[in-house]
Structure formats: C-alpha cells, structure tokens
Image: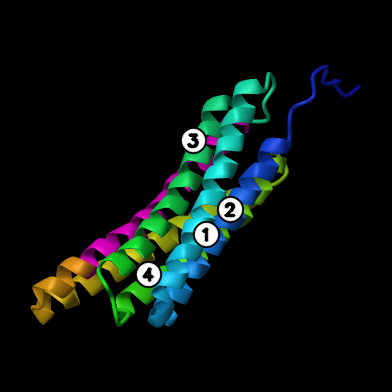
C-alpha cells in the first residue's frame, strides 16, 4: 500500500522557480537585442532593469514562502541555493546591460554578442532542467544530461571570453580593452552562475537518488 503523506508538500516553489527561469531567459534575450541594435541601448537597459525587478520579486516570494512552509519539496538549503543562483543569473545579466550604457558603447563587440548567445543557450538549458525538478525520481537521467550540457556551454563561454580578451589586448586600445573586459566579465559571471546552479541541482539529484 502506498504511504500517505499526512502533510502535503508545497509544490508552489517549483512554480516560482519556473517563473524565475522565464525571467532569466527574457533578460538574456533583451541583452542580445541591446547588442544587436546598440542605438536602442538605453531603451533596452530600462527593459532589462524592469526584468531584474521582476526577478527580485519572484526570489523574494521564494524566500518568504520558505520561511512560512513546514514541509518543503526540497531541503530548505537547496531551495535557498537554487533561488540565489537564479537571482545571480538575472543580476549579472542586468549588470552587463548597465555597463554597455555606462561606458557609452556605440558598436557591439563580436565577442560580446557571441558570449550572450552562449548565455541565451545556457539559460534555456536552465529553464528545461528546473522544470524537471518536480519529478526528481522519474527525470533523474534527463536532469543530469541538462546539467552536463550547461557545463559544456560554460566551457564554450570561457573559450569565447579568453579569445575576445586576447584580441582586445593585441589591438592595443587600452580604453576599449577596459570597457569590454568589464562587460565580458558580467556576461561570463551570468553563465558561471548557470553552471553553479547545475552543480546545486546535481547534488539535489544525488540526495534524492
């Protein structure tokens, strides 16, 4: 006979996580739009700021619900870790957009556009893997496959970052180097947070195996 759960788990956490991944995807897409049409940089910056505020609201809801929920679907520390990584992905995406405007960029660097494409691919993988957390037991293999893909994309982002930075060094324009190095680093950090999230999810899978 199946064991009855006397106190049902609150599945609303998964809804909030999925909302946060949608926001992360929207942020990455808006950043790519900014670099594709740099004349609209300020307009895109405002859009990304609104996206980041929406992300903050969702993460706040996660933390608030965590403080008020007795039985959670995942360990509380794992819920905090997942929420924190999702928040960081969105925050670093916004930080990149803010620097594009702050440094008065007039022409998008090819390396930045390539790096944001990797960010877009990575947050889509994050969206897919987070959606599978509702069924840890049944989707274990698929979850781990998405985590592996996120790690692969992070490595690809590292290569693009190094190559783009190397080209800037060789070009010898110190101002351009400093400007784009800052922007690259924020995008790279957003991708790194995706990898950190994948690591958290892998540990959750191991716990629930």
Residue 81, label in figure: 3
> Residue 158 in the image: x percent, y percent?
31, 63
Structural distance between the alpha carbons of marks 4 and 3: 25 Å
Between residue 80 and residue 133, name the one nearer to us.
80
Left or right, 6 with respect to 20, comes to right
Q: Within 10 Å of the Cα at label 2, are there few (<14), some (14-19), or many (20+) other Cα atoms?
A: many
Residue 49 in magenta stretch? no
- Residue on which the image places disc 1: 123
Residue occupying image coordinates x 59% and y 26%: 75
- Residue on which the image places disc 2: 21
Mark nearer the N terminus (4 vs 3): 3
> In this picture, which residue range is highlighted in magenta?
180-209
**Residues tagged 1 and 2 counted as in contact (Cβ below 8 A):** yes
Residue 115, label in figure: 4
Residue occupying image coordinates x 30% and y 63%: 99
Label 1 secondary element: helix
- Could you say which quadrant of the image residue 126 lies in? bottom right
> Residue 130 in the image: x percent, y percent?
61, 48
Mark nearer the N terminus (1 vs 2): 2
**Residues tagged 1 and 4 counted as in contact (Cβ below 8 A):** no
Structural distance between the alpha carbons of marks 1 and 4: 12 Å
Label 2 secondary element: helix
């Amino acid at each position: 006979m199946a064991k009855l759960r006397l106190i049902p788990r609150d599945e609303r956490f998964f809804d909030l996580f999925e909302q946060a991944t949608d926001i992360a995807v929207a942020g990455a897409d808006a950043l790519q739009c900014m670099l594709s049409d740099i004349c609209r940089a300020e307009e895109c910056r405002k859009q990304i700021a609104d996206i980041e505020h929406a992300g903050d609201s969702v993460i706040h809801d996660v933390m608030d619900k965590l403080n008020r929920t007795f039985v959670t679907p995942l360990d509380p520390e794992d819920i905090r870790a997942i929420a924190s990584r999702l928040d960081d992905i969105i925050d670093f995406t916004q930080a990149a957009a803010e620097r594009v405007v702050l440094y008065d960029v007039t022409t998008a660097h090819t390396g930045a556009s390539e790096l944001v494409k990797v960010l877009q691919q990575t947050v889509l993988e994050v969206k897919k893997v987070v959606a599978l957390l509702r069924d840890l037991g049944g989707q274990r293999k698929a979850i781990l496959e998405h985590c592996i893909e996120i790690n692969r994309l992070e490595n690809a982002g590292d290569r693009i970052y190094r190559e783009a930075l190397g080209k800037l060094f060789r070009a010898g324009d110190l101002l351009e180097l400093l400007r784009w190095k800052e922007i690259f680093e924020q995008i790279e950090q957003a991708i790194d947070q995706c990898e950190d999230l994948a690591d958290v999810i892998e540990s959750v899978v191991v716990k629930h195996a």
